[in-house]
Amino acid sequence: MKNVSKLTVKGLSANTPLGLMMLCLFLFFACAEKPETDTTAELPNIVLIVGDDHGYPYFGFMGADYVQTPNMDTLAASGTLFTQGYVPENHCRPSLNTLMTGMMPIDYKLRLAEMMEERNIPDSGKVEFDHHAMQYFQTLPVLLKEKGYKSFQGGKWWEYNYQNGGFTHGMSTGWTKDDKKDGGKWFKQFMGGEGLNLGRATMEPVYEFIEEYKSDPMFIWYAPELPHYPFDAPDRYYNLYKDKDMTESAKRYYANCTWFDDGVGELTRYLKSVGEFDNTLFMYVNDNGWEQRPDQEFWDDPMRSHNGGDKGKSSIYDQSFRTPIIFSWKGQIESGVRKSELIHSADIPATVLDYLGIDAPAGYFGKSYRPLLEGKPFEARKEIIGNVTTTRSFEDMMGQPTEGFWYRDADWFFRWNKTKGEQELFAQLKDPNNDNNVMADHPEVASEILKRIDAWKKPRAEYFSESK
């Protein structure tokens, strides 16, 4: 509504009945004159920042004073930080699928199998269908488009091209038959192709998108391949660590962490420069965990130099799934808040939809944490359960098929490698590194957790029967 500081109608006085009536009519039409299409101007921009192989401890705001992450520290301080966030799987693609669909990876796979059956896809075509299937899901960009959002994909992206995810714009354009003749080239395209240049080689595509569509509400998927291998940060980042008392692999990994952090700083500064920062909802999450303490040396270890320590990526330990999750929106989300409540990465898209007044589709696992962000009564998750399909292998860099499960509540972390017959229980708050298996001391706790996992599996029994 226009700002009217003084109401006058020529020839009439508000002290007369006719004048009063005319002023009321004037107010009515002044309030009604704003067209409905202008409501898009009130919608926030959405920026989802996704770390690639970024272990949860390795930020200044998480207490790692040996890693320089000033821009992420600023982002965390500017909003609400959840220190006990979790992703559903121990490697990237299924975790990214969850951010796009709000579904658990196992539920995504079950729906994928139904689609293949509905379409009579032969076994020979199932892998190809899988690569293109995201287009049949109600992804976050598809749902935001209903509100007039323009969307941009940049960075890690396994789903063929950006259009498959419902983005209006993006950097990943898929692959060709010729690309498949070269396994190394094809895998690079599979991970995201040109999208992998974002943050590592250029920021221009996202800047160009912002400049062109800043008059529209924007959704930006900012998922640079950092601090992911290769650990080849430019000297200006590596030199920050080269003389520190830490191993070479730690120096290289932390340099990539700072490289990632610098890209976040560039993006936020650009949004400020074009006047789009204040009305932007920022969120941060990792795709999976990583282990690299300052004293761990993996530089001459082919497996661990690519995958980090054994309790991080592709393992079934807490550090493989845990992530900080940040929500920041100037003037809308309280700043300087740290929360210890459990939260799942699937809750990120659910929270976004809630802020925009969009109903979550059927099958959403995520729940909106908006009430908690607004200081209202809210029952956060009491437990998080997940499964894994792969663990690391010294014979195959891509890992080995594994049926495994994990459980986290306020007190405990439980890991179950069913393929190897391993079960371990850890007092999570006292033992966040999962060093001391206390299952023998608390058999009743392990027994109850196994019941909880069985209950979690029941609606998904078809998947587990087929996976044997």
Image (cartoon, rainbow, N blue to C red):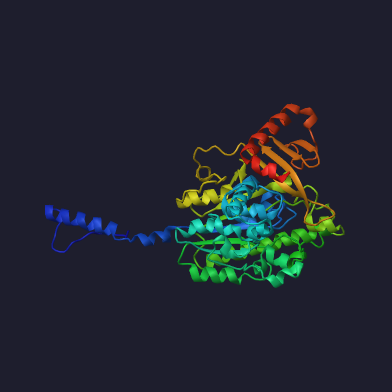
Percent position of residue 433, x then y: 76, 43
Percent position of residue 109, x then y: 63, 50
Residue displayed at 69% across by 34% down: 411
Q: Relative to residue 413, is residue 15 drawn left or right?
A: left
The answer to whether residue 146 is seen in the rendering is yes
**For residue 242, which quarter of the picture?**
bottom right
Q: How many marks?
A: 0
Q: Eyeballing the image, is 92 above or below 445?
A: below
Quadrant containing the N terminus in the rendered view: bottom left
Percent position of residue 390, x then y: 75, 49
The answer to whether residue 247 is seen in the rendering is no
Camera-side residue: 454 or 290?
Answer: 454
Q: Relative to residue 10, is residue 203 drawn left or right?
A: right
Q: Eyeballing the image, is 366 above or below 142?
A: above
Residue displayed at 62% across by 50% down: 113
Residue displayed at 65% across by 52% down: 95
Q: Relative to residue 273, is residue 254 drawn left or right?
A: right
Percent position of residue 260, x then y: 68, 61
Quadrant containing the C terminus in the rendered view: top right
Looking at this view, name the residue that lies furthest to the top: 444
Camera-side residue: 259 or 196?
Answer: 196
**For residue 258, which quarter of the picture?**
bottom right
